[in-house]
Image: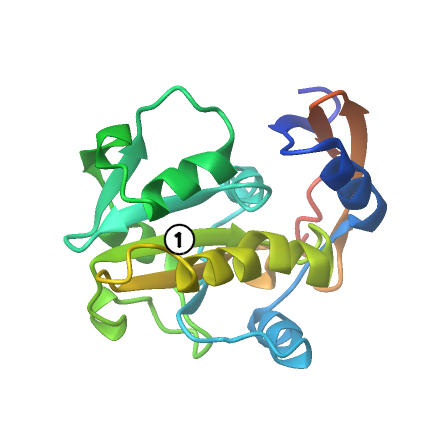
Amino acid sequence: MKLNNYLIPIILLSSCKSIIINTLIRDAKVENTASIKKFQIDNKFDTSNSFIVKADTATAMKWIEKGIASYEIYNSDGRLIEFIGKEDCPGVQFQFFLEGKKDSFKVNNNILLLNLLDNCYNYENRKANKKDLPKSDYYVVTYWSKFMGRKFGYKQAVGYTEDDIKDNKLKKYLITVIKVNTDLQESWGMQPKGRMSVKMKVRKTELDFVFGKLPIKK
């Protein structure tokens, strides 16, 4: 970390995707509940089971990193299902899950969906609650942020995940997608209408994200 900059390396799924991402990503703007909801509605995205991360100036970058390229799978008890196979590609790992390859996963009893929801709030600015979610066999949490490609980025992080689940071979299982936004928020102590610079460097199969100074409210 140098001069308030954060460097985050991300493994890309393809060189084509790296070019598209590099073209569409913009500086991270400070958002609020209304602007996040409006983005989904304006682009005709489903807002059900949508939440925003609750953070502060100290934990902001941890959640920004989550929103770049990550998802999590929880079982019906809300316990994390971890991939234990040899495949590095997140997309392939997710396909293993959809194909029912249970030997590639194990339950982590120490990481709970309840703990994540405790750090989220809904579009009515109320704390997220598992009781408000449909009863499901699995919960797939997808993290997303507007600055990561906007409409295209949302489809990559959320839309394609929802489509894959609809087409999956586990038809006997009910799977709920939980959409968690990780954009910088005014409620995190950020300056309204502020922004943080985002720069990228493509290195073969990796894309380095360099974030500038957080726009903390004075």
In the image shown, does 18 or 126 lie closer to the viewer? 18
- Give the residue drawn at x 42%, y 64%: 166
The image quadrant that residue 174 belongs to is: bottom left
Q: Residue 120 at x, y = what percent?
A: 39, 59
Residue 71 percent coordinates (x, y):
44, 45
Q: Is residue 40 left or right of residue 210?
A: left
Taking the image as shown, residue 141 lies to the left or right of residue 91, namely: left
- Does residue 112 appear left or right of residue 48 in this picture? left
Count the numbered circles shown: 1
Given residues 7 and 89, the one toward you in this image is 89
The quarter in which the N terminus is drawn is top right
Is 158 above or below relative to 203?
below
Q: Which residue is mark 1?
A: 141
Q: Is residue 34 visible?
A: yes
Residue 26 seen in the current view = no
What crowding class fits label 1: few (fewer than 14 Cα within 10 Å), some (14-19), or many (20 or more)? Answer: many
What type is the residue that disc 1 sits on?
Val
Q: Is residue 131 left or right of residue 117?
A: left
At 76% across and 52% down in the image, what residue appears?
Answer: 195
Q: Residue at x 60, y 68 (%)?
A: 32
Dot 1 lies on which element? strand
At x 69%, y 50%, the residue is 148
Comparing 186 with 134, the one in front is 134
Residue 190, horizontal then vertical, whole percent: 63, 55
